[in-house]
Image: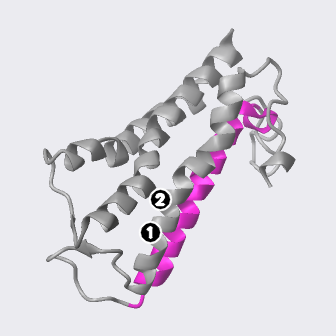
Amino acid sequence: MLKNIPVGDTERPVPRWALRLAKALPFVVLPHCLWRLPFAFDFRMGTVDPNAGPYVWWFTPYVFALSLITEALALLTLGMVSGWGEVFPRWVPFLRGRRVPPLGPLVATVLGGLVLFGLFGLQPLAWLGVLDEVGFSNGWWEALARVCIGPAMLWGPITIALGIAYYRRRTA
């Protein structure tokens, strides 16, 4: 699927590391999205949370939407290494066909990356007991959670790195 998305078709060459990171990012966050899906059906994946409320009907569409939005945002970073991330599309009124100012995506990726770091990057502190964490019924569930959630910690730093590379390439 990702082979059909035009990447690297930019005015200036994209660093090979940036191409690889942008293509890998949807797969980096995929385990976290898959980990989340059983919760949509009230399967708690071994978590022990005394504050967890009863299952409500809207939880299923919420969890699925959250996973889809997560993957869509990860795919959106392909714009940092693609020609379609340098020119506004035709459907954008007043801006269609104009060049995207490089500062806009830089600000968006740095702010987004910092938010993502705040959401996921502090997870090791919870694992070390510095921050509170939901408990698990046994070590196997905890290990599975860490394997699935752990890669999402890279989402923020990768997004920031891609934004900086985009800005450097566009302003060089």
Q: Residue at x 42, y 54 (%)?
A: 147
Q: Is residue 145 above or below residue 63?
A: above
The disc labelled 2 sits on which kind of residue?
A: His
* Residue behind mark 2: 32
Q: Residue at x 38, y 82 (%)?
A: 43
Q: Position of residue 139 (x, y in %)?
A: 26, 63
| Quarter in which the N terminus is drawn | bottom right
Q: Which residues are magenta?
A: 57-86
Q: Secondary structure at mark 2?
A: helix
Q: Main secondary structure of the magenta part?
A: helix
Identify which residue, 60 or 102, lies in the foreground.
60
The image quadrant of residue 172 is top right
Q: Is residue 166 above or below residue 118?
A: above
Residue 36: numbered disc: 1
Q: How many marks?
A: 2
Q: Secondary structure at mark 1?
A: helix
User: On the picture, is 116 further left or further right than 16?
Assistant: left
The disc labelled 1 sits on which kind of residue?
A: Arg
The reply to whether callout 2 and callout 1 are in contact (CB within 8 Å) is: yes
Mark 2 is surrounded, within 10 Å at the Cα level, by few (under 14), some (14 to 19) or many (20 or more) other residues, namely: many
Residue 55: numbered disc: none
Q: How is the image coloured?
A: one colour
User: On the picture, is 145 further left or further right than 2?
Assistant: left
